[in-house]
Image (cartoon, rainbow, N blue to C red):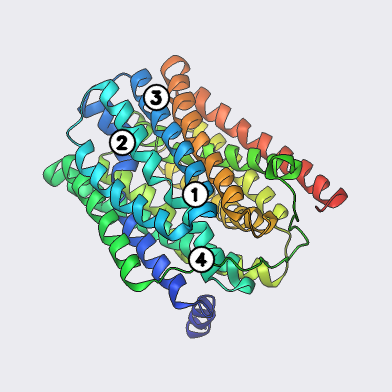
Amino acid sequence: MFQTALRRYINNFRGFRREVWILTLITFINRAGTMVLPFLSKYLKENLHFTYTQVGWIMVAFGIGSMLGSWLGGKLSDKIGFYRIMVFSLFTSGILFFVLQFITTFWGLCFGMFLLMTIADMFRPAMFVSLSVYAKPENRVRALSLVRLAINLGFAAGPMLGGLIILGIGYQGLFWVDGSTCIIAILIFAFFVKEKKKIPELLDEQNLVLEKKSVFKDKSFWVFLFISFTTAMLFFQIFTTLPLFHHEQFGLSEFETGLIISLNGLLIFMFEMPIVSLFERKKINRIKSILLGTVLMAISFYILLFDAWVGILIISIIIITFGEIFIFPFANGFAMSRAPKDQVGRYMALYTMSFSLAHIISSKLGLEIISRFGYTTNWIVMGSFGIAAMLFCLKLKQMIKNNPS
């Protein structure tokens, strides 16, 4: 029984080209080194002694830079190619991580975070475009899931290692590791992957490809972007308000917080690829999967209202993780499937920008609510956003049914 289950699990990973595996490897290396992000709000609050409001504004600068970088990365990927953007982005952001540790003033960190994320997040839409080139049309959604698996496996290792580094040598070590992994990852990519400029025509799996139509006129896509923004905003609470909640409500250490956050990545490693493969084989509509994920996202925050028991943190992270599994890989596939072959970069730029905007709103809104009204109000607000995303999913499903293009 075990061998059969293991063989089925391994079969989910067959059929990928060599370049996809290398993209997956560098993504894992990069994300395993992204140890600063889960502890950034704690670092700013407890080590640099900024107020909640100041931490919120630094996170806003972080998010604005991410939005600008996502747009530039997508637009330039269509203009000059994804390959150059990926190399420039990771190498330069690695250098900037080294520099960022020496900045301790409020305005300096606002500018530093803005510049870092502008350059770092040029990588994301370029990476999505690279998958449209290197992955076979019939397994693009699985390729997206494979890269997401690497991201989350990296996040599983990163917070645990980050917590140990903080306990051992302090927060400064996180910046050195983060910068080094960016540079190592892109050197591996440049050495093993050759540039390929032609973007093949996307497979029209669900009759969703738009021909010669501007992304700004695609009403269904903009409804989808709102759903992506809302669910990403809920997801980012894991890295902004939840670590503070762990410490202030339950007195957890950085290492204990890292273990709980790492559970997110480990569950995704175990379950995402089998679930995605099953849904693809059964041809389950992507919007239905996203709808299920929004319901789980809402529940994961509402149950935090029962905060008398520390175990509720584990239950919440499990539920939000399965919400993420049902939403993000299928949202990636939906965004890519709607893009005409000459606008993949623009579509994926707007998609990644929705995450960047979510990071701005998530951190600022969450921290302001906590500062003024407390954690209980924040969990109610976030759960309600999950319900709003669910309603917009129902709307999108109807729009697609009435007008597939």
Q: Amino acid at mark 3?
A: Gly
Q: Amino acid at mark 1?
A: Leu
What element does badge 1 sit on?
helix
Look at 57% across and 28% down and name the residue there: 380
Marks 1/4: CA distance? 13 Å
Comes first in the chain, label 4 or label 3 = 3
The residue beneath circle 2 is: 40
Q: Amino acid at mark 4?
A: Lys
Foreground disc of the pair 2, 4: 4
Look at the numbered discs 2 and 4 and tell me whether their residues touch, using CB distance below 8 Å.
Answer: no
The residue beneath circle 1 is: 76
Marks 3/2: CA distance? 11 Å
Q: Give residue 93's position: percent from left, percent from top.
A: 30, 46
Q: Give residue 215's position: percent from left, percent from top.
A: 68, 45
Look at 40% across and 71% down and name the residue there: 194
Residue 272 shows up from this direction: no
Look at the numbered discs 1 and 2 and tell me whether their residues touch, using CB distance below 8 Å.
Answer: no
Q: Which mark is residue 96?
A: none
Q: Which mark is residue 56?
A: 3
Instruction: Please state if 121 lies on the left or on the right of 323 as rendered.
Output: left
